[in-house]
Image (cartoon, rainbow, N blue to C red):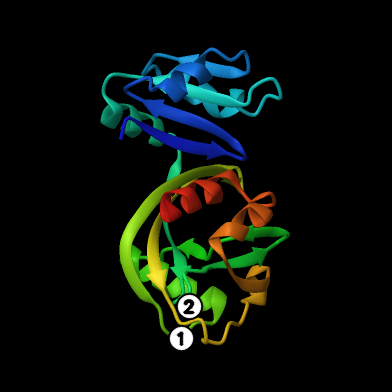
Amino acid sequence: MSYIKIYFGTKPVFLCDELTEELDLLKEKKDTIYQESLSNYILQAMPKDIEKPEYNAGIIFHDDLAQLKEVFFDQFQVIQAGGGVVYNEKEEILLIFRNGKWDLPKGKADEGEDIEECAAREVKEETGLKEVSVGPKSTITWHVYTERGTLILKETHWYLMTASVNAMLIPQVAEGITEILWADKSDLPKYTVNTFPAIIDVLEASTS
């Protein structure tokens, strides 16, 4: 991987050690912040700067992506989470409607919990599914939010899963989930107009 994409709300910040064609085009836009530095001052400024209305994306370049990731992540409280892209026998995908947005089942890992086990547990809890088969990891997403004044960076590991189309679905209302459905791949665009950019990334990685 030549970059890591971190969402601050709907705005992506890319940590990279290579300017791909996509990133090179993004770099030239006036609403993109571009930095080449491991300076703590520069890195700490990015979360504040990306919130400004004149910016829609950010890029931080360094020739050692692992080092850049370590230094950048140090300014956040990093938490682990797991989620699932669940298919049935008809190759339909399970979507949930949570707090006014179409979403995929996911949640934070409990202390000491294996991330794959976390993903399966969260899918079951949020959808009412009793049985899911966990397949390979599809992708990882990152997003930042503030909780009680602390900057949180959530790293979510997404797994491909399967479940029966005939299984009973029960939305976890306590988590703001009011609807669950199986969606055909061809119908996904009508749901993704009302979802989060990171969920679109997960679906693209999981349906290609």
Q: Find residue 167 and report its horizontal and vertical position in percent.
A: 51, 86
Residue drawn at x 58%, y 15% as measured from the top left? 29
Write down the residue under mark 2: 124
Label at residue 89 = none
10 Å neighbourhood of mark 2: few (<14), some, or many (≥20)?
many
Element on which disc 1 rests: loop
For residue 105, side relative to residue 155 (left or right): right
For this rendering, which residue is in front, 146 or 23? 23
For residue 14, side relative to residue 199 (left or right): left
Location of residue 21 with respect to 109 vertically, above or below: above
Type of the residue with mark 2: Lys
Q: Find residue 198 and report its horizontal and vertical position in percent.
A: 53, 46
For this rendering, which residue is in front, 192 or 145? 192
Is residue 112 among what the camera can see?
no
Location of residue 134 with respect to 59 vertically, above or below: below
For residue 130, side relative to residue 173 (left or right): left
For residue 105, side relative to residue 176 (left or right): left
Q: Find residue 197 and report its horizontal and vertical position in percent.
A: 58, 44
10 Å neighbourhood of mark 1: few (<14), some, or many (≥20)?
some
Is residue 159 among what the camera can see?
yes
Pick the quarter of the image with the N terminus: top left
Type of the residue with mark 1: Lys
Write down the residue under mark 1: 130
Quarter of the image where one finds residue 36: top left
CB atoms of marks 2 and 1 within 8 Å: yes
Location of residue 70 with respect to 161 vertically, above or below: above
Compare marks 2 and 1 and give the one earlier in the sequence: 2
Q: CA distance from mark 2 to mark 1?
A: 6 Å
Residue drawn at x 51%, y 69% as measured from the top left? 92
Element on which disc 2 rests: helix
Q: Find residue 24 and report its horizontal and vertical position in percent.
A: 45, 17
Quarter of the image where one finds residue 163: bottom left
